[in-house]
Amino acid sequence: MHVELRDIHKHFGPLRANDGISLTFEPGHIYGILGENGAGKSTLMKILSGYQAPTSGQILLNQQPANFASPSDALRRGVGMLYQDPLDFPPMRVIENYQLAYDNKIMLPLRQREEDLIAFGKRFGFTLDTRAYVDTMTMGERQQMELLRLLALGAELLILDEPTTGISAEQKTALFDAMRRLAQEEQKTIILVSHKLEEVQELCDEVSVLRKGKWVGSHPIPCPTAEMVRLMFGEELPRAERVSCRVEKTVLKLDKMAVHTYHLNIDNISLDIHEGEVLGLAGLEGSGQQLLIKGCAGLLPLYRGRVMLDDSPVEGQRSPFFWLPGLSGIVFSGGFAAMIVRLLLGQITGIAAAGELTLAALLAGAIWLVGTIIISWTSQSTYHAFQQRGGAYVPAERLEEALIPGLSLTEHMALATSGKSMLVNWKDAQDEIARRIQQFNIKGQPQTLVDKLSGGNQQRAMLALMKSPLRLLLLEHPTRGLDVTSANWMWELFQERLKEGTAIIFVSADLDELLERSDRIAVFSGGVMSRMVNTTDTTVDELGHMIGGGES
Amino acid sequence: MENALKRIWPAVPVILALFSTTLLIMAFGSNPILTYGAFIEGAFGTEDSVLNTLAFWIPLLLCATGLLVTFTAGLWNIGVEGQLVMGAIGASWVAIAVAGPNPSIPAWIIIPLEILAAMAAGALWAALCAVLKTRGGIHEIFGGVALNNLAVIFTNYLISNPWQPPRGGSFTKTERFLDTALIPVVGTSRFSVLSLVLVIVALVLIGLALRGSSWGLRLKAMGKNLKAAFIQGVPSEREAITGMMVAGALAGLAGAVRVLSWYDSLRQSIGGGIGFLAVLIVLLAGTQPILTAFIALVFSALLNGGTTVQLRTQLHSALSGVIQGALVLFVLLFGDYNQVFRKKSETTPVETAHE
């Protein structure tokens, strides 16, 4: 199917998620759509698959204009989308899910459909257990099932949204083989949405790159990785002269740090950050930068290694009563053993023994409960210890993770300063926040609720709430979503902190920002951190090459 | 104009609820004016009925006061009924095991002991619910419902086994406690001055703490955004457990009041649905202490007036429950002025451009 997008615009309030995108897709080819998070790829694909309507612009299928009322309407006209999270029914069997593809009458021709599905799957090298429940299957198998369902419904254009997230290497090979055959033998049009450069290189015939809602270029494959990165992140701008505040005194030392999570591991990371120094973390979203930041802040447990802030490890306070819940196990085992002995000696009957065991269990449960309560009162989390030692963490999602909607600026101030005092001194909190509102140029009043502030003002409010002096400031995408003026103002505020000796580690997707603001840059790729490069001796090209997975 | 409407808006769901109940009363062929009159007479007609309305109001308000704390912290403490029952058991244990064999111990020692035991039992039962949540990942609603049932089963075990009356027991209650173990009541009513003082102190303290203490502010922050509160430095596990324990202690105190002055022994029906009613009250009142006290009084009056309604008209006393239910439904449906009159354009799409 010949597909054409003409001048697609999609606006969410002031945000232009898609800003005049025109693209053409020919049958029998595989196209890659590349872009960083927030570049507008998903929005564009949601428009093409009928999930949402464009603000303006046109979709042409085989030269005919199309307006989709819903995703199922789009599917009827041959546009099928494979979502990142499969749209299936986990508590049902594969065959039942597949049945839903058809316009079923009262009777379900189960056996017939089952044979169809198996034969259909074989054609693409998928072997599915048709009677398996979906919630017992891997992500890759669910994807295969979903793909067969879309094809059975007559999809001529297939959109795959980040299809290789969470599937195995073999499943990826099978998926890519199936895609190639669909394109070559059946003349389907295929679009692969991804931010993984190597996948696009491997599978696609042509790649189009989006940045900040705009189309920035298309290139036939093979295309040099550096060229793709240049398109994704932009041209190198003339760099402004930057005064470093770096002083030879270590603030943070990571010693063979490892953080393991369900999705990704980072291992064996050692580095030193000095007073007044800025370390920028580059890399595609989800390559391990966040793990480093959260591991430093104590928000993720260390799998191995140490985080040293001012020469002593960042550790929460373990309760002196940590052994109390363990005692409950001893009490129960003791009771159990005593009961067995007495039962064997014939001192008590079976009924009485059961009664005693119940009592022992109740006693053990009570000890465990009281122990847990006492521990919660006497321990401190690693993150709060980190905060107390002069660390601060600013997450990327301001209203979800950092500010409290429904609370005023004064209340935030009181929360940040109340500490151990019993009563809130509302007047002090209000005076203090009023002073900081002035200092940080926040457009708001002390009694303004934080959710009523604009994004830039929320960001400033978060900085205004931080205590002084700060030793270490961890920032995730500190200027994402801000205009140039607000971003510059943010960095002026950070500069003030740097002069006081604060060290900064920040994650950014903006290579210009990284090059302009950091002393050193480390690049993450698939959980591996590169050696650190001095900002003065590197270029956008070199960084792009490292982001794409090549060591320089 | 719009402001005036906004000011009187809270009356609208109340009027709607009364209107619909009036229709219901008429549909059953009764005179609505007579019926409402009977309610008022039943609740406030005589000195004793006023005192009994107050006597029922006290444990109800104690539970609701505790719920103010947990609702502020965003915790759905449905387990308050079970906490009340455990409080009643705690007080009964002191009355049976300490006061029973020692009739010489004076009331001024026994009663504080009973109250302390009741608050501790309620607090621990609530703490169990909180720990199941913070350590076990069990939502407090499910934990609360399960613990409610366990508390009732435990009561039934106690009154049918170890605390069974020595002779002619009917398995529905224990023996009457000694006079030294009971809270003194006024005349022939079930109202005690001590309980009234306790509930007022509790409400004032909790009201002030939620408004002006660092603790109250931390709970409020947790209720609005748990994740961000943690990032801002609130030790959320500790505060969740403490908040639940405060609510549980107040529910336990309510249990002591139930067992030591409303009744004189531990019974199967000791909870009487007071915990669930308290949840409804706090749903209606939001987190305003004065309004909570007022709505609790209205609910108590409705329940106490129900019997008189049944005597005067052919209507069943369950009509009280119907009125309460209608009130809650209408307030939840139409209570929020801004929600009812929100313009379509203000509901901006929640979709984002991020993937």
Image (cartoon, coloured by chain):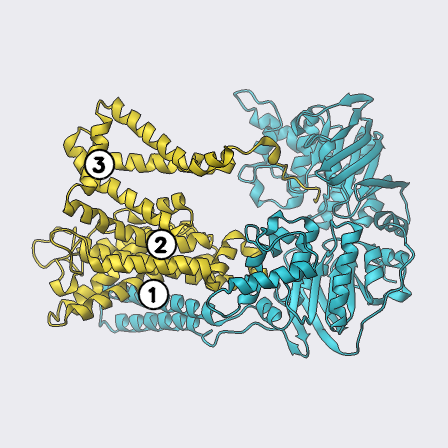
Chain colours: A cyan, B yellow
Relative vertical location of residue A544 with respect to residue B107 in this rendering, above or below = above
Q: Amino acid at mark 2?
A: Thr
Q: Amino acid at mark 1?
A: Ala
User: Is residue B64 or residue B290 the one in the foreground?
Assistant: B290
Tell me what residue is drawn at x 60 percent, y 37 percent.
Answer: A88
| Residue for badge 2 | B65
Quadrant in which the N terminus of chain A appears: top right
Q: CA distance from mark 2 to mark 3?
A: 26 Å
Q: Earlier in the sequence, mark 2 or mark 3?
A: 3
Percent from the top left, x then y, of residue B327?
A: 35, 36
Q: Amino acid at mark 3?
A: Phe
Can residue B252 be seen in the rendering of this structure?
no
Q: CA distance from mark 1 to mark 3?
A: 50 Å
Q: CA distance from mark 2 to mark 1?
A: 33 Å
| Residue for badge 3 | B39
The residue marked by circle 2 belongs to what chain? B
Badge 1 marks a residue whose secondary structure is helix
Quadrant in which the C terminus of chain A appears: bottom right
| Residue for badge 1 | A361
Badge 2 marks a residue whose secondary structure is helix
User: Is residue A355 or residue A39 the one in the foreground?
Assistant: A39
Q: Is residue A266 left or right of residue B88?
A: right
Tell me what residue is drawn at x 72 percent, y 75 percent.
Answer: A251
Can residue A307 be seen in the rendering of this structure?
yes
Tell me what residue is drawn at x 31 percent, y 60 percent.
Answer: B201
Of circles 1 and 3, the one toward us is 3
